[in-house]
């Protein structure tokens, strides 16, 4: 069988890429592991924090893209539990950037109708950053055009541990009977409860691992790995990821719809 040639989008403008998207097959929820900020900076002989600062511009563009396309939920990995092992200087700079971002972006989030929510063991971040997190959560709580989940001090396994712990307390107090517990019930204890699982996970910088992100929620997510470093992942890159997503056939364990019933074994 002749191999299908991959479409080449290099010569297309953003408007042309946008026109190629099928509005009926867009993800409802996108998750992103924003990786490669340090390498972006090192390549330019800059301190790593310059890469984190530049990465914020990508966050802005991707939020705008989600709003333009009416994608209802975006979950971005900003700081993992494992990232606490980085040098204090980098951690402090990241927390300062987070605080600055929240201060400067609040009005823009409101204008876009975006609800901001932090997920993870958020209470472990420094109090001045935490105050801003809570302030922006409160100020955007009524907005519903886009839910922006920002994973801070987040780990997928500890999210499950925390959920199970609260569930065990509810069982102990007699509020929950063990036979009530099924997948949907446990999901109700996760930080993303009520949201559809991500349809698409994007990881930048060429790494092809999950790094403890959304372990429960990614069970049937389509994975998109790109060598592009996060500060270079802008609107155009987002459109390319969505076009790739639209080529995937999501089978969820079933047989391919492309295979006719007659040709199945
Ligand atoms: C991702 O970029 C941002 C955070 C983890 C906070 P990195 O800082 O991991 O960048 P690289 O992977 O070292 O290039
Ligand atoms: C994952 O990136 C965490 C975030 C993007 C916040 P890392 O750079 O920390 O992941 P590893 O260490 O390469 O797996
Ligand atoms: Mg990294």
Image (cartoon, helix red, strand yellow):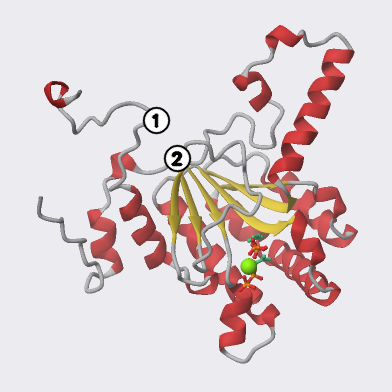
Front residue (pair 167, 258): 258
Q: Could you tell whether 74 is left or right of 18 in the image?
A: right
Q: Position of residue 145 (x, y in %)?
A: 52, 43
Task: Classify mark 1: residues with Cα within 10 Å, few (<14), some (14-19) or many (20+).
Answer: few
Q: CA distance from mark 2 to mark 1?
A: 17 Å
Q: Position of residue 150 (x, y in %)?
A: 66, 52
Q: Nearer the viewer, mark 2 or mark 1?
A: 1
Q: What numbered label is drawn on residue 252?
A: 1
Q: Name the image quarter holding residue 101.
A: bottom right
Q: Residue at x 73, y 54 (%)?
A: 152
Q: In what quadrant does ligand 2 lie? A: bottom right
The residue that disc 2 covers is 28
Q: Name the image quarter holding residue 127.
A: bottom right
Front residue (pair 103, 56): 56
Secondary structure of the residue carrying numbered label 1? loop
Q: Name the image quarter holding residue 71.
A: top left
């Amino acid at each position: 069988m002749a191999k299908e040639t991959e479409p080449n989008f290099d010569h297309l403008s953003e408007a042309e890429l946008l026109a190629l998207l099928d509005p009926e097959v867009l993800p409802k929820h996108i998750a992103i592991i924003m990786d490669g900020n340090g390498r972006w900076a090192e390549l330019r002989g800059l301190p790593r924090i310059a890469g984190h600062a530049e990465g914020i511009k990508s966050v802005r563009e991707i939020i705008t893209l989600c709003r333009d396309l009416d994608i209802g939920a975006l979950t971005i990995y900003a700081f993992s539990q494992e990232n606490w092992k980085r040098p204090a200087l980098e951690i402090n700079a990241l927390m300062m950037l987070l605080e600055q971002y929240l201060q400067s972006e609040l009005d823009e989030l409101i204008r876009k109708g975006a609800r901001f929510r932090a997920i993870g063991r958020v209470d472990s971040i420094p109090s001045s950053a935490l105050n801003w997190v809570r302030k922006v959560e409160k100020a955007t709580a009524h907005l519903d055009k886009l839910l922006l989940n920002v994973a801070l001090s987040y780990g997928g396994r500890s999210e499950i541990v925390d959920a199970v712990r609260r569930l065990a307390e509810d069982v102990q107090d007699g509020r929950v009977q063990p036979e009530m517990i099924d997948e949907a019930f446990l999901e109700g204890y996760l930080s993303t409860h009520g949201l559809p699982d991500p349809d698409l996970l994007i990881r930048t910088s060429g790494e092809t691992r999950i790094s403890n992100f959304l372990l429960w929620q990614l069970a049937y997510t389509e994975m998109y790995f790109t060598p592009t470093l996060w500060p270079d992942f802008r609107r155009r890159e987002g459109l390319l990821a969505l076009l790739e997503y639209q080529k995937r056939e999501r089978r969820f364990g079933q047989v391919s719809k492309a295979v006719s019933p007659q040709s199945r074994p």
